Protein backbone atom coordinates (compact mmCIF):
# COMPACT_ATOMS: atom_id res chain seq x y z
CA UNK A 1 0.00 0.00 0.00
CA UNK A 2 1.93 3.04 -1.24
CA UNK A 3 -0.73 5.75 -1.42
CA UNK A 4 -4.32 6.48 -0.43
CA UNK A 5 -7.01 8.75 -1.77
CA UNK A 6 -7.00 12.48 -1.14
CA UNK A 7 -8.46 13.25 2.30
CA UNK A 8 -8.37 9.60 3.41
CA UNK A 9 -7.88 9.17 7.17
CA UNK A 10 -5.85 6.33 8.62
CA UNK A 11 -4.98 5.16 12.11
CA UNK A 12 -1.23 4.74 12.50
CA UNK A 13 -0.18 2.41 15.34
CA UNK A 14 3.39 2.45 16.58
CA UNK A 15 4.71 0.02 19.22
CA UNK A 16 8.02 -1.26 20.48
CA UNK A 17 10.91 -0.39 22.81
CA UNK A 18 10.78 3.27 23.78
CA UNK A 19 13.77 5.55 23.31
CA UNK A 20 14.26 9.29 22.77
CA UNK A 21 13.39 10.73 19.38
CA UNK A 22 10.68 8.35 18.19
CA UNK A 23 7.82 10.85 18.33
CA UNK A 24 9.98 13.65 16.91
CA UNK A 25 11.17 11.45 14.05
CA UNK A 26 7.62 10.30 13.32
CA UNK A 27 6.43 13.89 13.10
CA UNK A 28 9.27 14.70 10.70
CA UNK A 29 8.07 11.93 8.35
CA UNK A 30 4.49 13.21 8.53
CA UNK A 31 5.55 16.80 7.97
CA UNK A 32 7.66 15.90 4.93
CA UNK A 33 4.62 14.19 3.39
CA UNK A 34 2.31 17.14 4.14
CA UNK A 35 0.04 14.96 6.33
CA UNK A 36 -2.46 16.43 8.78
CA UNK A 37 -2.67 15.05 12.32
CA UNK A 38 -6.24 14.85 13.69
CA UNK A 39 -5.60 12.95 16.92
CA UNK A 40 -2.69 11.47 18.87
CA UNK A 41 -2.26 9.51 22.08
CA UNK A 42 0.86 7.92 23.53
CA UNK A 43 1.67 5.80 26.57
CA UNK A 44 4.79 4.05 27.82
CA UNK A 45 4.46 1.00 30.08
CA UNK A 46 7.63 -0.58 31.49
CA UNK A 47 9.71 0.86 28.67
CA UNK A 48 7.35 -0.27 25.90
CA UNK A 49 5.81 2.43 23.70
CA UNK A 50 2.28 2.42 22.32
CA UNK A 51 1.48 5.40 20.10
CA UNK A 52 -1.62 5.99 18.00
CA UNK A 53 -2.26 8.77 15.48
CA UNK A 54 -5.15 9.62 13.19
CA UNK A 55 -3.72 11.32 10.10
CA UNK A 56 -5.12 12.60 6.84
CA UNK A 57 -2.92 11.45 3.95
CA UNK A 58 -2.29 13.78 0.98
CA UNK A 59 -3.04 12.45 -2.48
CA UNK A 60 -0.25 10.59 -4.27
CA UNK A 61 2.26 10.58 -1.37
CA UNK A 62 4.15 7.45 -0.34
CA UNK A 63 3.59 8.24 3.31
CA UNK A 64 2.85 4.70 4.37
CA UNK A 65 5.99 3.34 2.77
CA UNK A 66 8.02 6.06 4.48
CA UNK A 67 6.45 5.24 7.84
CA UNK A 68 7.27 1.56 7.45
CA UNK A 69 10.87 2.50 6.59
CA UNK A 70 11.01 4.75 9.64
CA UNK A 71 9.82 1.89 11.86
CA UNK A 72 12.40 -0.51 10.41
CA UNK A 73 15.20 2.00 11.01
CA UNK A 74 14.12 2.62 14.63
CA UNK A 75 13.37 -1.01 15.51
CA UNK A 76 9.67 -0.44 16.14
CA UNK A 77 6.47 -1.84 14.65
CA UNK A 78 4.22 0.38 12.51
CA UNK A 79 0.85 -0.67 11.08
CA UNK A 80 -2.26 1.03 9.71
CA UNK A 81 -6.07 0.94 9.57
CA UNK A 82 -8.17 2.92 7.09
CA UNK A 83 -10.82 4.86 9.02
CA UNK A 84 -12.88 6.55 6.34
CA UNK A 85 -13.15 9.80 4.49
CA UNK A 86 -13.70 12.14 7.44
CA UNK A 87 -12.35 12.08 11.01
CA UNK A 88 -14.92 12.34 13.79
CA UNK A 89 -15.61 15.91 14.82
CA UNK A 90 -14.24 17.20 18.08
CA UNK A 91 -17.76 18.01 19.28
CA UNK A 92 -18.89 14.45 18.65
CA UNK A 93 -15.83 13.06 20.42
CA UNK A 94 -16.42 15.25 23.47
CA UNK A 95 -20.01 14.26 24.23
CA UNK A 96 -21.21 12.08 27.11
CA UNK A 97 -17.83 11.83 28.81
CA UNK A 98 -17.41 10.47 32.32
CA UNK A 99 -14.34 9.79 34.42
CA UNK A 100 -14.47 6.48 36.26
CA UNK A 101 -11.92 6.03 39.04
CA UNK A 102 -11.23 2.49 40.24
CA UNK A 103 -9.43 1.98 43.56
CA UNK A 104 -8.51 -1.04 45.67
CA UNK A 105 -5.74 -2.72 47.62
CA UNK A 106 -4.80 -4.79 44.57
CA UNK A 107 -7.40 -4.50 41.76
CA UNK A 108 -7.42 -8.05 40.48
CA UNK A 109 -8.38 -9.05 36.93
CA UNK A 110 -11.77 -10.13 38.31
CA UNK A 111 -12.36 -6.68 39.83
CA UNK A 112 -11.17 -4.82 36.75
CA UNK A 113 -13.25 -7.13 34.57
CA UNK A 114 -16.35 -6.49 36.67
CA UNK A 115 -15.92 -2.74 36.17
CA UNK A 116 -15.39 -3.18 32.42
CA UNK A 117 -18.50 -5.38 32.18
CA UNK A 118 -20.54 -2.77 34.04
CA UNK A 119 -19.41 -0.04 31.65
CA UNK A 120 -20.31 -2.18 28.63
CA UNK A 121 -23.68 -3.14 30.14
CA UNK A 122 -24.50 0.58 30.43
CA UNK A 123 -23.82 1.01 26.70
CA UNK A 124 -20.62 2.99 27.30
CA UNK A 125 -17.11 2.52 25.95
CA UNK A 126 -13.68 3.02 27.52
CA UNK A 127 -11.62 5.57 25.57
CA UNK A 128 -8.57 5.75 27.81
CA UNK A 129 -7.08 4.15 30.93
CA UNK A 130 -4.40 5.85 33.04
CA UNK A 131 -2.81 4.48 36.21
CA UNK A 132 -2.89 7.00 39.05
CA UNK A 133 -1.17 5.08 41.83
CA UNK A 134 0.34 1.85 43.06
CA UNK A 135 0.56 3.04 46.69
CA UNK A 136 -1.12 3.19 49.16
CA UNK A 137 -3.74 1.63 46.87
CA UNK A 138 -3.90 0.72 43.22
CA UNK A 139 -5.99 3.20 41.26
CA UNK A 140 -6.85 3.78 37.63
CA UNK A 141 -8.69 6.57 35.86
CA UNK A 142 -10.89 5.58 32.91
CA UNK A 143 -12.31 8.04 30.40
CA UNK A 144 -15.68 6.60 29.38
CA UNK A 145 -17.97 7.87 26.62
CA UNK A 146 -21.53 7.10 25.67
CA UNK A 147 -24.20 5.19 27.53
CA UNK A 148 -26.76 6.40 30.03
CA UNK A 149 -25.11 8.14 33.04
CA UNK A 150 -27.67 6.79 35.53
CA UNK A 151 -27.25 3.23 34.29
CA UNK A 152 -23.47 3.65 34.23
CA UNK A 153 -23.32 4.76 37.85
CA UNK A 154 -25.74 2.05 39.01
CA UNK A 155 -23.89 -0.70 37.14
CA UNK A 156 -20.50 0.34 38.52
CA UNK A 157 -21.78 0.69 42.09
CA UNK A 158 -23.30 -2.77 41.73
CA UNK A 159 -19.94 -4.14 40.64
CA UNK A 160 -18.27 -2.53 43.65
CA UNK A 161 -20.90 -4.00 45.97
CA UNK A 162 -20.12 -7.50 44.66
CA UNK A 163 -16.34 -7.05 45.05
CA UNK A 164 -15.16 -5.93 48.49
CA UNK A 165 -11.75 -4.95 47.13
CA UNK A 166 -13.14 -2.52 44.54
CA UNK A 167 -14.14 1.10 45.09
CA UNK A 168 -15.63 3.09 42.22
CA UNK A 169 -16.22 6.79 41.59
CA UNK A 170 -18.08 8.23 38.60
CA UNK A 171 -17.78 11.93 37.72
CA UNK A 172 -18.76 13.92 34.66
CA UNK A 173 -15.70 14.85 32.63
CA UNK A 174 -15.19 18.58 32.15
CA UNK A 175 -13.74 21.74 33.60
CA UNK A 176 -15.87 21.50 36.74
CA UNK A 177 -14.16 18.31 37.83
CA UNK A 178 -10.70 19.82 37.32
CA UNK A 179 -11.49 23.11 39.04
CA UNK A 180 -12.16 22.02 42.63
CA UNK A 181 -10.89 24.68 45.04
CA UNK A 182 -12.31 24.00 48.51
CA UNK A 183 -12.14 20.71 50.46
CA UNK A 184 -14.13 20.43 53.71
CA UNK A 185 -13.47 17.43 55.95
CA UNK A 186 -15.28 15.90 58.86
CA UNK A 187 -12.88 15.16 61.73
CA UNK A 188 -13.82 12.15 63.86
CA UNK A 189 -13.30 8.86 61.96
CA UNK A 190 -12.34 10.87 58.86
CA UNK A 191 -9.34 13.13 59.43
CA UNK A 192 -8.58 11.22 62.62
CA UNK A 193 -9.14 7.57 63.46
CA UNK A 194 -10.83 8.26 66.77
CA UNK A 195 -14.07 9.71 68.09
CA UNK A 196 -12.59 12.54 70.14
CA UNK A 197 -15.41 12.57 72.67
CA UNK A 198 -14.65 8.93 73.48
CA UNK A 199 -11.10 9.89 74.41
CA UNK A 200 -12.51 12.41 76.86
CA UNK A 201 -15.07 9.87 78.08
CA UNK A 202 -12.29 7.39 78.83
CA UNK A 203 -10.65 10.02 81.04
CA UNK A 204 -14.02 10.61 82.77
CA UNK A 205 -14.70 6.89 83.29
CA UNK A 206 -17.82 6.88 81.06
CA UNK A 207 -16.45 5.35 77.85
CA UNK A 208 -19.09 2.63 77.40
CA UNK A 209 -22.05 4.98 77.82
CA UNK A 210 -20.59 7.61 75.48
CA UNK A 211 -19.52 5.05 72.88
CA UNK A 212 -23.03 3.61 72.70
CA UNK A 213 -24.59 7.07 72.26
CA UNK A 214 -21.98 8.01 69.62
CA UNK A 215 -22.52 4.85 67.60
CA UNK A 216 -26.29 5.26 67.57
CA UNK A 217 -26.06 8.96 66.66
CA UNK A 218 -23.64 8.36 63.78
CA UNK A 219 -25.92 5.64 62.41
CA UNK A 220 -28.82 8.11 62.42
CA UNK A 221 -30.72 6.34 65.20
CA UNK A 222 -30.64 9.25 67.67
CA UNK A 223 -31.09 13.00 67.38
CA UNK A 224 -27.60 14.39 67.17
CA UNK A 225 -28.04 17.44 69.41
CA UNK A 226 -29.79 15.52 72.18
CA UNK A 227 -27.22 12.75 72.13
CA UNK A 228 -24.34 15.24 72.07
CA UNK A 229 -25.63 17.13 75.11
CA UNK A 230 -26.11 13.84 76.94
CA UNK A 231 -22.57 12.76 76.15
CA UNK A 232 -21.05 16.11 77.11
CA UNK A 233 -22.89 16.00 80.45
CA UNK A 234 -20.93 12.83 81.28
CA UNK A 235 -17.67 14.80 80.93
CA UNK A 236 -18.46 17.17 83.80
CA UNK A 237 -15.54 17.60 86.21
CA UNK A 238 -12.71 16.76 83.83
CA UNK A 239 -9.74 19.10 84.34
CA UNK A 240 -7.48 20.57 81.67
CA UNK A 241 -4.78 17.97 82.33
CA UNK A 242 -7.25 15.20 81.39
CA UNK A 243 -8.20 17.11 78.24
CA UNK A 244 -4.51 17.38 77.29
CA UNK A 245 -4.05 13.63 77.81
CA UNK A 246 -7.01 12.92 75.52
CA UNK A 247 -5.52 15.25 72.92
CA UNK A 248 -2.21 13.37 73.02
CA UNK A 249 -4.01 10.10 72.22
CA UNK A 250 -5.69 11.48 69.08
CA UNK A 251 -4.49 9.48 66.03
CA UNK A 252 -4.43 10.84 62.50
CA UNK A 253 -5.96 8.71 59.76
CA UNK A 254 -3.22 7.13 57.57
CA UNK A 255 -2.46 9.49 54.71
CA UNK A 256 -3.93 12.55 56.44
CA UNK A 257 -0.69 14.55 56.43
CA UNK A 258 -0.01 13.69 52.78
CA UNK A 259 -3.57 14.60 51.83
CA UNK A 260 -3.59 18.03 53.46
CA UNK A 261 0.01 18.82 52.47
CA UNK A 262 -0.68 18.02 48.81
CA UNK A 263 -3.88 20.06 48.72
CA UNK A 264 -2.02 22.99 50.23
CA UNK A 265 0.74 22.77 47.62
CA UNK A 266 -1.84 22.71 44.83
CA UNK A 267 -3.54 25.84 46.12
CA UNK A 268 -6.71 24.28 47.51
CA UNK A 269 -8.41 25.87 50.50
CA UNK A 270 -8.91 23.32 53.28
CA UNK A 271 -11.37 23.32 56.17
CA UNK A 272 -12.47 20.98 58.93
CA UNK A 273 -15.92 21.00 60.48
CA UNK A 274 -16.75 18.79 63.42
CA UNK A 275 -19.57 17.79 65.71
CA UNK A 276 -16.73 17.40 68.20
CA UNK A 277 -14.88 20.15 70.00
CA UNK A 278 -12.64 23.12 69.30
CA UNK A 279 -10.00 21.84 71.71
CA UNK A 280 -9.28 19.14 69.12
CA UNK A 281 -9.94 21.01 65.87
CA UNK A 282 -7.81 24.01 66.88
CA UNK A 283 -4.87 21.69 67.53
CA UNK A 284 -5.37 19.82 64.25
CA UNK A 285 -5.60 23.10 62.36
CA UNK A 286 -2.23 24.20 63.72
CA UNK A 287 -0.52 20.83 63.27
CA UNK A 288 -1.60 20.28 59.68
CA UNK A 289 -1.77 23.83 58.35
CA UNK A 290 -5.52 23.68 57.66
CA UNK A 291 -7.02 27.02 56.63
CA UNK A 292 -10.36 26.98 58.49
CA UNK A 293 -11.90 25.07 61.41
CA UNK A 294 -15.33 25.00 63.05
CA UNK A 295 -16.60 22.86 65.96
CA UNK A 296 -18.52 22.87 69.23
CA UNK A 297 -17.04 24.67 72.23
CA UNK A 298 -16.89 22.99 75.64
CA UNK A 299 -17.61 25.21 78.64
CA UNK A 300 -14.66 25.42 81.02
CA UNK A 301 -14.94 27.03 84.48
CA UNK A 302 -12.08 27.17 86.99
CA UNK A 303 -10.06 24.72 84.91
CA UNK A 304 -12.76 22.05 84.71
CA UNK A 305 -15.42 21.06 82.18
CA UNK A 306 -18.93 21.89 83.31
CA UNK A 307 -20.67 19.29 81.13
CA UNK A 308 -22.23 22.02 79.00
CA UNK A 309 -21.56 23.61 75.60
CA UNK A 310 -21.09 27.27 74.73
CA UNK A 311 -22.92 28.66 71.70
CA UNK A 312 -24.76 26.86 68.93
CA UNK A 313 -24.51 23.18 68.11
CA UNK A 314 -22.54 22.00 65.06
CA UNK A 315 -24.96 19.36 63.84
CA UNK A 316 -25.90 17.95 60.45
CA UNK A 317 -27.54 21.13 59.17
CA UNK A 318 -24.82 23.35 60.60
CA UNK A 319 -22.10 21.41 58.78
CA UNK A 320 -23.80 21.95 55.41
CA UNK A 321 -24.44 25.59 56.25
CA UNK A 322 -20.77 26.06 57.14
CA UNK A 323 -19.63 24.68 53.79
CA UNK A 324 -22.03 26.92 51.87
CA UNK A 325 -21.19 30.06 53.87
CA UNK A 326 -17.44 29.43 53.68
CA UNK A 327 -17.58 28.90 49.91
CA UNK A 328 -19.65 32.07 49.50
CA UNK A 329 -17.25 34.07 51.67
CA UNK A 330 -14.27 32.85 49.62
CA UNK A 331 -16.06 33.41 46.31
CA UNK A 332 -15.89 29.71 45.38
CA UNK A 333 -18.82 28.27 43.36
CA UNK A 334 -20.58 25.33 44.99
CA UNK A 335 -19.64 22.97 42.16
CA UNK A 336 -15.96 23.58 42.99
CA UNK A 337 -16.28 22.25 46.55
CA UNK A 338 -15.53 18.78 47.94
CA UNK A 339 -16.85 17.34 51.21
CA UNK A 340 -15.54 14.21 52.93
CA UNK A 341 -17.28 12.51 55.85
CA UNK A 342 -18.42 9.25 57.39
CA UNK A 343 -21.44 9.77 59.63
CA UNK A 344 -25.13 10.61 59.40
CA UNK A 345 -24.43 14.19 60.50
CA UNK A 346 -22.28 14.60 57.35
CA UNK A 347 -25.08 13.75 54.92
CA UNK A 348 -26.32 17.30 54.29
CA UNK A 349 -22.76 18.54 53.78
CA UNK A 350 -22.02 15.76 51.27
CA UNK A 351 -25.22 16.57 49.38
CA UNK A 352 -24.59 20.32 49.01
CA UNK A 353 -20.94 19.94 47.94
CA UNK A 354 -19.94 19.72 44.31
CA UNK A 355 -18.45 16.31 45.13
CA UNK A 356 -19.51 14.41 48.24
CA UNK A 357 -17.24 11.55 49.31
CA UNK A 358 -18.25 8.98 51.92
CA UNK A 359 -15.03 7.81 53.58
CA UNK A 360 -15.33 4.41 55.30
CA UNK A 361 -18.85 5.51 56.02
CA UNK A 362 -22.01 4.05 57.47
CA UNK A 363 -24.46 2.55 54.93
CA UNK A 364 -26.89 5.46 55.27
CA UNK A 365 -24.09 7.83 54.20
CA UNK A 366 -22.83 5.73 51.29
CA UNK A 367 -26.32 5.70 49.81
CA UNK A 368 -26.45 9.50 49.36
CA UNK A 369 -22.81 10.38 48.60
CA UNK A 370 -21.53 10.91 45.07
CA UNK A 371 -18.92 8.26 45.72
CA UNK A 372 -17.71 6.07 48.57
CA UNK A 373 -14.25 4.86 49.58
CA UNK A 374 -13.64 1.80 51.72
CA UNK A 375 -9.84 1.95 51.73
CA UNK A 376 -8.35 3.19 55.03
CA UNK A 377 -6.07 5.85 53.52
CA UNK A 378 -7.24 9.45 53.40
CA UNK A 379 -4.78 10.40 50.66
CA UNK A 380 -6.68 8.05 48.32
CA UNK A 381 -9.16 10.93 47.98
CA UNK A 382 -6.46 12.70 45.92
CA UNK A 383 -6.92 10.13 43.17
CA UNK A 384 -10.61 11.03 42.87
CA UNK A 385 -9.39 14.54 42.04
CA UNK A 386 -7.18 13.17 39.25
CA UNK A 387 -3.93 13.67 41.17
CA UNK A 388 -1.29 11.00 40.51
CA UNK A 389 0.79 9.45 43.26
CA UNK A 390 3.96 10.10 41.27
CA UNK A 391 3.18 13.82 41.30
CA UNK A 392 2.70 13.75 45.08
CA UNK A 393 6.01 11.99 45.63
CA UNK A 394 7.82 14.28 43.18
CA UNK A 395 6.56 17.31 45.09
CA UNK A 396 7.78 15.80 48.37
CA UNK A 397 11.24 15.16 46.89
CA UNK A 398 11.43 18.68 45.48
CA UNK A 399 10.45 20.28 48.80
CA UNK A 400 11.56 17.90 51.59
CA UNK A 401 12.45 20.58 54.13
CA UNK A 402 8.96 21.77 55.04
CA UNK A 403 6.35 19.16 54.12
CA UNK A 404 4.25 19.91 57.20
CA UNK A 405 3.91 22.80 59.62
CA UNK A 406 5.60 22.04 62.96
CA UNK A 407 3.49 20.75 65.82
CA UNK A 408 2.75 23.40 68.44
Image: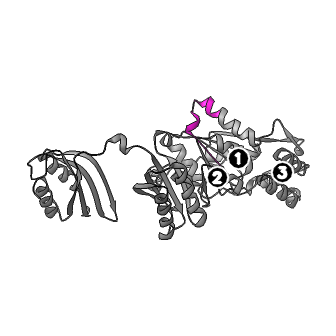
Left or right: 137, with 53 as reference point: right
Q: Distance between the residues labelled 1 and 3?
A: 14 Å
Magenta-colored stretch includes residue 339: yes
The number of numbered discs placed on residues in the rendered structure image is 3
Q: Is residue 275 above or below residue 195?
A: above
Left or right: 382, with 35 as reference point: right
Q: Where is residue 347 in the image (x, y as percent from the top left)?
A: 70, 46
* Quadrant, the N terminus: bottom left
Q: According to the image, what is the colour scheme of the structure? A: one colour
Magenta-colored stretch includes residue 241: no
Q: Is residue 200 above or below residue 46?
A: above
Residue for point 77% across, 53% down: 218
- Of labels 3 and 2, earlier in sequence is 3
Q: Tell me if I can see residue 399 in this picture.
A: no
Cβ–Cβ under 8 Å for marks 2 and 1: yes
Name the residue tied to disc 1.
346
- Quadrant location of residue 292? top right
Q: Is residue 195 above or below residue 353?
A: below
For the residue labelled by badge 3, is the local secondary structure a helix, a strand or a loop? loop
Q: Distance between the residues labelled 2 and 1?
A: 9 Å
Mark 3 Cα-neighbour bin, 10 Å: few <14, some 14–19, many ≥20: some
Residue for point 71% across, 40% down: 319
Q: Position of residue 339 (x, y in %)?
A: 62, 45
Q: Distance between the residues labelled 3 and 2?
A: 20 Å
Name the residue tied to disc 2.
358
> What's drawn in magenta, residue-wise?
326-340
Name the residue tied to disc 3.
222
Amino acid sequence: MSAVDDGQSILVRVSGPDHPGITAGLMAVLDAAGARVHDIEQIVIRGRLTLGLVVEVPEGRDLLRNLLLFGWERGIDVDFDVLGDEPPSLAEHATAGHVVTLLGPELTPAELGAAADAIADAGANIDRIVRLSRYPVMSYELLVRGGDPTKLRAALLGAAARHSGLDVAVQAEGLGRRAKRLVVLDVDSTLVRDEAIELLAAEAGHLDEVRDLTTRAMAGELDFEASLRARVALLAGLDTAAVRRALEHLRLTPGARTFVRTLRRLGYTTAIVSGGFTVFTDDLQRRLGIDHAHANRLELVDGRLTGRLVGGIVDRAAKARYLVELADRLGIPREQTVAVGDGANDIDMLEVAGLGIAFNAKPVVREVADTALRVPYLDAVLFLLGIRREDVEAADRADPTAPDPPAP
